Each structure stands twice: as C-alpha cells, then as structure tokens.
Image (tube, rainbow, N blue to C red):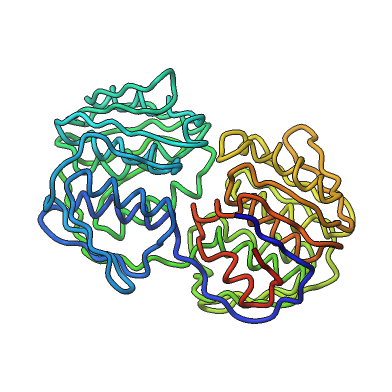
C-alpha cells in the first residue's frame, strides 16, 4: 500500500492510541492471574497486541474482544505448543519467561524483520533460573521448557531491557525466590515502567536496576482490571506534526506517565515549538524552529519523529544514543539517513550521535524498510515538504498504530492512497 502525503496545514484534536508496551504487559499479567478473568479497557488493537493475545490463547487463556475492552480468562482454553510472535520483539523476548513457568515445551516463532533480531540474551538467565532455553544461534525460534524455579541470574541489559521485563513479570509466580544482577542497562525508563506496573498489580520487588533486584516467589497477581493509557510513542508523531505544520492537541496522554517517550515534550520545547501540557492532553503549535540537542539512549523510539522535526529546524541538531538503533525493525540509523536523504535532508553519523542539518525537504518516493516508525516519520515530514512524498509499504504502521494515517488526515493532513 502506498500513501501520498502533501504539504498540509494541521489543526484539530485527536485521541492518542493505546500504549502497546503497557498492553503487552497487561496481557502477560492476565495470563499469570490465577483463577480469575482480567479485563483490559482501552486495549491496543495493533499487530503486536494481536500477537500477544494469540500467545495468551496459546498458553491456555480464553480471550474475548468486546467493545472498548478485552477480557482474558487464564486456564480456560487449550494449550498450543507453537506460539507465533509475528514481528513483535517484545513478545519474543517477554513471553518465553512466562511460558517457562509451565512444564510443557513451547516454541516461539518469528517472521519478517524479527527473524534478524537478537534473542541470545534470553538463554543464560532462563537456564540459571531452572528452565530450558534454546535459540538458533542467538536468533528465533526460541524453545523453552520449565518449570522456572527461581534462583540467581545475571542479566545483560546492554542490548535490550525486554528480556528483563519478561523475567520481572514471570518470576513472582515461581516457587522460589529470585535475585537478578542487572548490568549495562540501557532502557532504564522501560524497566521503571515495568516495576511500577507490577507494584500496581500487587507484586513486590525490591532493589533497583541496574543493580540487584530481589523477587519473592509464590506471589499472586491481585489486580483484575487494567486501563491502558495513551501511547506517547505513537503520539510523538502527531505532536511533531503540530510543530511542523500548524497546531494539534493529542488527548489521552498522562503527563506523569513513566513512558520514556514522554521526553518528546522536552525536545519540542527545545526546538522552539509551542507546547501546552494539560492534565490529560498535550497541545503543540508551530514556532520558530531551531536546532536542538537530545540524548535518546533511554528513548530510542523518539529518533524517527525527532529526525522529522530536526529536518525542518534551522541549524544542526544532535541526537545522541544512536547505538540503540541497530537492532530495531530496521537499522534505523541507516534507514533514516537513506530515506530522508531521498527528500534532500542532510543527515550523518558522528560517533554515537546522529546529526541533522535542517533545511527544506523536497518531495519524492521513499520506503520505510518495513519499519512502522520510519513510515510515520516520513509521513510527518511530508506535511512540510516542497513536493508530494510517496511512502511505499505504508501499511507497516499497523505494527503499532493502525489508525495513524486516518488520524493524521483527521487533523488536516493531505493524504491519499
């Protein structure tokens, strides 16, 4: 599917999509809630969320999709040995620990770009904690078999925090106590999000990451309802659209959220855009945009929208933390340089930073490399381009934000297929 995006005037309000990250955590918690159905309101309906719900069904849960909510009843259905993660890296790195609480063997399969993303970090911790875990030379498929008993394990958080998130969700249900020594942690904000989620679900964990986390075993998830907050990762593209092309209000965002991508507000303010933060919404309007500097090591998903922003700022923007982009749905650093380069942007690497010299973008045909965030960034950039931007394979936005193009059009984006 191709999308054509022309220079536009943005004005209006839009509801933020539901957080994919919190949705997947809620699905895992629901699977681990013994003897009670769990209701998830404002559920995410993206491809990754659907993959998580299919895995929940494969682990024996019954799933009902109702208007505005999803109900998960653990233990009410048959168990399936092969579990398909689609292209969801979080599913592939989170759910093996959950499945390892059981004595059956499970095979987690991947497709597309996920077949190239590393999962070797799962093996040593799960084995140290009593489970079997094998990968294909560090790549999918992942084979696990429990039971996960607890104990001590070292976790390397240098590449991704997602494996640690899976352990933190699963180990409270293990028979024994556990102690995780976490080193080289990059995505600290995502771990804090997980720890806060667990506290709200009635789970006790002590310690801090990086460092030592202690998880008592034999705990129970006591919460039976979750309301999924708005997704700052998806909303970031809409907020940048306001800064580039007019004014937009995104509702359903919690300014006190622990989601790492809330930092987009800081970046927008540094760039000179007008930012108004309200109790459950954020408004952004166009300003005299100037180059800025940000460290995105803890919020790597902000690289694509902030490259779109920086490409229209006066001067040279520096975005630090580029090493976090190598193993996403694409090599995002290379993809951003290549595709924005087709539109006339001057982007280069300098050590651990991505440098973007602002200017006037031209139209052209671009490809997102199968990466949902690259596709959204190119679309937002097209709102302020000198010619029409044609985005090939635009349907990949369904991975996290299926309604992205509809929402952008609803606030004035000139978009057609």
Q: Position of residue 109 (x, y in %)?
A: 36, 33
Does residue 95 lie above or below 270 as drawn? above
Q: Quadrant of the N terminus?
A: bottom right
Q: Position of residue 256 (x, y in %)?
A: 50, 67
- Give the number of callouts: 0
Observer-nearest of 162 and 382: 382
Observer-nearest of 116 and 30: 116
Which residue is located at x 22 percent, y 49 percent?
57
Does residue 244 lie above or below 392 as drawn? below
161 with respect to 415 (left or right):
left
Which residue is located at x 13 percent, y 45 percent?
78
Residue positioned most to the bottom: 12
Which residue is located at x 64 percent, y 63 percent?
417
Residue positioned most to the top: 137
Does residue 17 lie above or below 190 as drawn? below
Q: Position of residue 203 (x, y in %)?
A: 25, 52
228 with respect to 348 (left or right):
left
Location of residue 242 by image quarter: bottom right
Observer-nearest of 74 and 196: 74
Q: Position of residue 183 (x, y in %)?
A: 47, 30
Observer-nearest of 244 and 140: 140
């Amino acid at each position: 599917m191709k999308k054509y995006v022309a220079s536009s005037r943005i004005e209006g309000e839009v509801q933020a999509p539901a957080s994919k990250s919190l949705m997947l955590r809620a699905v895992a918690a629901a699977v681990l809630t013994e003897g009670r159905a769990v209701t998830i309101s404002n559920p995410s309906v993206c491809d990754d969320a659907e993959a998580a719900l299919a895995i929940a069904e494969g682990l024996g849960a019954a799933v009902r999709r109702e208007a505005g909510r999803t109900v998960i009843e653990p233990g009410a259905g048959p168990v399936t040995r092969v579990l398909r993660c689609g292209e969801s890296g979080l599913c592939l790195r989170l759910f093996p620990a959950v499945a390892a609480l059981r004595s059956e063997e499970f095979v987690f399969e991947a497709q597309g770009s996920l077949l190239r993303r590393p999962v070797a970090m799962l093996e040593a911790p799960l084995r140290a904690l009593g489970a079997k875990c094998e990968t294909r030379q560090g790549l999918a498929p992942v084979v696990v078999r429990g039971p996960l008993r607890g104990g001590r394990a070292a976790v390397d958080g240098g590449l991704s925090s997602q494996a640690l998130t899976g352990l933190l969700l699963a180990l409270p249900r293990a028979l024994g106590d556990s102690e995780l020594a976490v080193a080289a942690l990059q995505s600290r904000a995502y771990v804090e999000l997980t720890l806060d989620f667990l506290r709200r679900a009635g789970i006790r964990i002590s310690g801090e990451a990086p460092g030592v986390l202690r998880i008592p075993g034999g705990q129970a998830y006591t919460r039976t309802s979750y309301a999924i907050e708005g997704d700052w990762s998806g909303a970031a593209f809409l907020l940048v659209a306001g800064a580039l092309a007019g004014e937009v209000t995104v509702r359903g965002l919690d300014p006190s959220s622990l989601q790492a991508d809330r930092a987009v507000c800081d970046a927008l303010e540094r760039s000179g855009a007008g930012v108004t933060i309200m109790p459950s919404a954020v408004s952004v309007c166009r300003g005299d945009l100037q180059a800025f500097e940000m460290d995105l090591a803890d919020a790597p998903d902000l690289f694509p929208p902030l490259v779109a922003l920086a490409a229209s700022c006066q001067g040279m923007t520096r975005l630090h933390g580029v090493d976090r982009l190598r193993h996403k749905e694409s090599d995002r650093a290379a993809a951003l340089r290549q595709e924005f380069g087709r539109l006339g942007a001057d982007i280069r690497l300098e050590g651990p930073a991505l440098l973007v010299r602002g200017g006037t973008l031209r139209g052209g045909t671009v490809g997102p490399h199968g990466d949902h965030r690259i596709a959204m960034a190119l679309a937002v950039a097209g709102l302020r381009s000198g010619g029409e931007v044609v985005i090939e394979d635009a349907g990949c936005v369904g991975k996290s934000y299926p309604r992205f193009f509809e929402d952008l059009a609803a606030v004035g984006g000139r978009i057609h297929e």
